[in-house]
Amino acid sequence: MMRSRVAAALLRRGKDQASALKTVPRLPRGSPAPSPAPPRVGSGSCGGGGGHLLPSPHPRSTGGLFAASRVASFHAFRSLGPKSCFGQCTRKMSTASAALNPTVANATANSALKLLVTKGPEAQKAVGIWLFGCAAWVFSMVILGGVTRLTRSGLSMTEWKFAGGLPPMSEEEWLLEFEKYKLSPEYMRVNKGMNLEDFKFIYWMEYAHRMWGRALGFVFAVPFGYFVAKGYVTRQLGLRLSALFALGGGQGLIGWWMVKSGLEEPASEYVEPRVSPYRLAAHLTSAFAIYCGILWTALSVVMPEPPAESMNWVKGAAKLRKLAIPVSVVVGITAVSGAFVAGNDAGRAYNTFPKMGDTWIPEDVFSMEPFIRNFFENTSTVQLNHRILATTTLLSVSGLWLTARKIDMHPAVKSLVGSTLGMAALQVTLGISTLLMYVPTSLGSAHQAGALTLLSLMILLTHTLRRPSPALLKSLASAVKST
């Protein structure tokens, strides 16, 4: 009881001081006078409690009264517990951006934002999970393809069928497949004398890679048809996914086109049989494009709007986006250059760092004619090019991180930029280790996985930094004007 009386006395004193400073709006004529009763705990806002300190709970009026009477009533407000008027006003001021969520939701509901999935949040969640699962499947496909190449298993199957088939089931069938492989240039020049058990290993690796790709087509097509039948997929999303599915089907053809180049007799007897670096780069680039397309679409489904709770964050994201897009291009070009390193077996040459042998730049970097061939077929030039691009990538991501530290933006975005820098540093470390250790399968696979992981982070960052919809921008601008 004594506590309430003290609080009421201090509140009346604060009200008198506020009136003297002329900071409290005058009550409309005819409205009842404020009651001297003590304030009730849990009133919902500073102006809506039992004391009726304000004629309306408008945030500006709340802020004015609080500024005028904070000296007189501070201790009384603290004594009323964590749900007091003081605590609620503080929380409102510190979470002003969170109050925009209903406005943004209403703007979205008014169809200003075109969603890719209809039928509500449950459908959105289901489609998002499916797409992220497909992206993870493609990721595993790329890694399995890298292991297949590093173990020199890609040329073990000398025939290709679009629908695939069963593997050899009997000893006779295995011997028949082995005899076909013995006719290939790789066996005659590289694996001469290989026994049947060793052949079975490389055959199973290539068979698993092919069947894993066909299984991906099933995993993609069946749920896609189901979601279309249920009416979850909009026309825009349907066209995008259909294009990705067609590209995935063509990926199998590109893969066989690549393998076929390795089954042909090399131009010189001193040249080791291998697939064309151009076709390998096309195969890997196509896989990266499919992965990036699925990942971007999945992010667009589950996150139709970027994190933008204030205009300052939107402006900060726009500044960083101007740098993030070119950095993403550099990361992509570096990944594609790695395909030419693999296609030319350039990682098995110049296994020193930072120099290439005894020099910084080998003498034969421009020895091929025409000049452009050096960048795609010359082992020295291809490796030097990849080293330069990798260093450029690390420096670019570092510059992006330094820029992000100086910009006011969402804390999650800054954390994402930091993670991207860490991944870039790890990827460079993996690349150097792979080179120095003469490309072991474990490190080579990890390096390829690192490239795709770094690319994934850049996609996520670019997607997060994209421009908000007009509805969200309008809501943010209206909120700024009303405060």
Image (cartoon, rainbow, N blue to C red):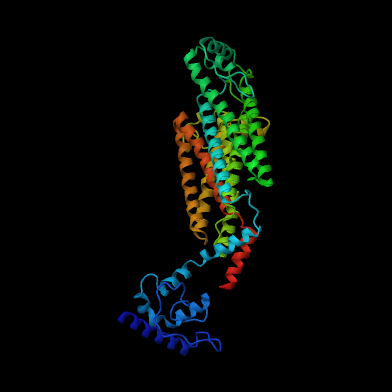
Q: Is residue 349 visible?
A: no
Q: Quadrant of the C terminus?
A: bottom right
Identify the image quadrant of residue 35: bottom left
Is 356 located above or below residue 28 in the figure?
above
- Left or right: where 133 falls relative to 224: left
For the point 43% across and 81% down, the residue is 51
Residue 366 in picture, x, y percent from top left: 62, 33
Identify the image quadrant of residue 383: top right
For the point 48% across and 58% down, the residue is 411
Q: Quadrant of the N terminus?
A: bottom left
For the point 35% across and 78% down, the residue is 75
Is 92 located above or below residue 168 in the figure?
below
Q: Nearer the viewer, residue 122 or 191?
A: 122
Residue 457 in picture, x, y percent from top left: 52, 46
Is 115 located above or below residue 158 in the figure?
below
Q: Nearer the viewer, residue 363 or 462?
A: 462
Q: Is residue 170 visible?
A: yes
